[in-house]
Every structure is written in structure tokens, then in C-alpha cells.
Amino acid sequence: MPIRKPMKPLRLCISLFAVAGLLAGCAQGAFSTQEARIGPNDSTDPCRAQLVALDSTGNYFGTQILTGAAVGAVAGGALGALIGRDWKGALIGAAAGGALGAAGGYWSALQQQQHDQAGMFTQVSSDLARENTNIDRTQQAFDQLMDCRFRQAQAIRVDYKAGRIDRSLAEARMGTVKQHVQHDLALAKQINGQIQGRSEQFEVAADNLAPGTKTAIATQAPAPRPATVRRAAPLKLQPDPAAADIGQLNASDPVIVTPSRSGYVLVQTPSGARGYAPASAIQGATGSAPLLSSGGSGGNDVRMLAGSNAARRDSFSQSVAVSEQAAASGFELAS
């Protein structure tokens, strides 16, 4: 039986980069249409417009995350093959490249596109500002979708209590809402993971341009702390006075609070329930997390934008977790 000669380094390199292109294409194209991601519009979902808005804004975050990892892994494999002249070297290089691609893909691409520090600062600042704007839009879309779902459930309860629909129809309608919410949350968690991955890449780039950024971001995150409810207040699904109520806080209740946004705090009750309440209703609470302080260095804009990005990232993740917990018991006829 003839012995097969090992693949030549150049041919191996070309093959690996071809695989990179395929991986990147598959990562971006697997769910490239809106119908594939959220299903067809059958005109029966009253919250369809809000779902489309979440998908449309959230789809932005899936455009580049996997590309860097795929190309980074295979590029690392090519390097390993050229150095070691075998597949073992390729696999080792691919592992190293994959690690780079997962968190350092953006920084690696930036170094290739920008050849001076001023250009890097400008590029990262611009990209972070755009990222933050898109997180804000996605946060708003998610809040509006969850608000629509919870109000839809409340309308079913009202109709059932008033005798306009019988129990079997009410339960069937509520079951449909539950199914929709599970799909909504799956989409939101996917978007959340993409935001997290991109944020890690931005932190790597920001820390290279302004050393100490990652440490500063880690220390800016406020720790949950015990507090006492000053006055009775509803526990809200979102940090918004118009948001759906998902619980009730009573004066003197012991709670755990974390600063949130819009003058609200994230509250955890002794039973483990979580939601949002006005900071003014909690003794000694503040309604916003501190951002990175400004300074005179050239990396100031990048550092502050990266800190703001991390705060937005954490806020979105927080809101998805709150909605998921609330959904576990928020779609019953007796709620």
C-alpha cells in the first residue's frame, strides 16, 4: 500500500484558509433570514411588531462575532502547519488561533487595518459608540416586547374574570402566550451571548490602547448590597414606571439591591423574586451605576466608552434574567 505524502505547507495553508471562509460563511448564513430566526408571520401574534424589532436590532450583533474566531483559529492552524510542517502543528495553532479569535479577533483585525495609534483610537471610539447605540436600541426593543407579552397575559385574565371567555379558551390563549415568550427569551439570550462576546473583544482592544481599562471595568460594576424598603412600591418588569407589575414591595421589607438605570434599582426579595423599583423607594439606594472617571490621557474616550459598553451589556443581561424569572410564574390565570 503506497504511503501518502504529507500535504505541502503552502497547500495546507490554502486549504485551512478555505475552511476559514466556509466556517465564517456558515456562522453568518445559517440563520440569515428573519423568517428562519423568528418564524413566518401568520397574523395571529399581537406582539409581532415588537418581536420583529428585537430581531432586527439584535441581528446586528451576530454579524462579526464568529468570523474573528473562525478565521483566527484557521489562521493559527496555518501558522502551526508552516512551522511544524504537520497536522499536529496545525491543530495546536488552530487552538491558539481560536482563543485569539474569541476575544482578540477585533484587536487583531484592527492592527491590520490601522497602522498608527491615532487611527486605532479613532476606530475603536467610533465602533464602541455605534455598539452602544445598538445595545440601547436592542434594550428598548426587548423591553417593549416583554411589556407587550405581559400585558397580553393580563388582558386574558381580565377577559376570563369578566366572563367574556371560558376557562378552556383562557388557558389555551395563555398557553400560546407562554410559547411565544419562550421563543422570545431564547432569541434574547442568543443576542445577549453575542453582546457579551463582542464586549469582551472591545475590552481587549481598549485595554491594549489604554492599559488598565479591563481592571477599571471590573471594579466599576456595583456589588449587590442589603437594604430596606422605605415605602411600599410595585416591583416592575423593567426600570420604567409604565412597565408591567410583577410583584409588590412593602415598607420595611429587607431586600438586596443593585443600581440599574433610569433612576431604578434591581431588587431581590427574601423569596428570591427579582424586579425593578424606584431608587427613592429604597433606603440609601442609588439608581445608576458609576461609570469610569475621565482623565487626561489619550485613551480617555476609549476607556469611558468601553466602561459604558460594559454597563449596557450588564444591564441587558440583567433584564433578560429578570424577564426569564418573571415568565416562570407570570402567565397563569390566577396571577
Image: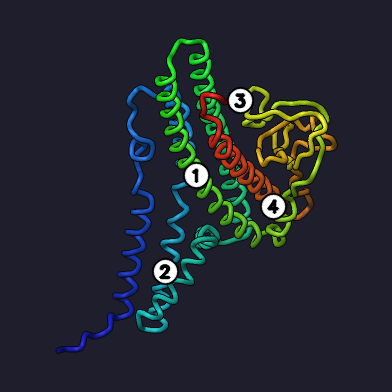
Foreground of the two, 235 or 289: 235
State which quadrant residue 17 falls in. bottom left
Quadrant containing the N terminus in the rendered view: bottom left
Q: Position of residue 196 (x, y in %)?
A: 56, 51
Q: Amino acid at mark 3?
A: Ala
Q: Position of residue 214 (x, y in %)?
A: 68, 58
Q: Position of residue 226 (x, y in %)?
A: 80, 44
Label 4 SS: helix
Residue 119 visible somewhere in the drawing:
no
Q: Amino acid at mark 2?
A: Ala
Q: Are marks 3 and 1 in contact (CB under 8 Å)?
A: no
Q: Which residue is mark 3?
A: 244
Single out the mark in the foreground, 2 or 1: 1
Q: Which residue is mark 1?
A: 191
Q: Is residue 322 above or below residue 218?
A: above
Residue 39 visible somewhere in the drawing:
yes
Q: Is residue 182 above or below residue 64?
A: above
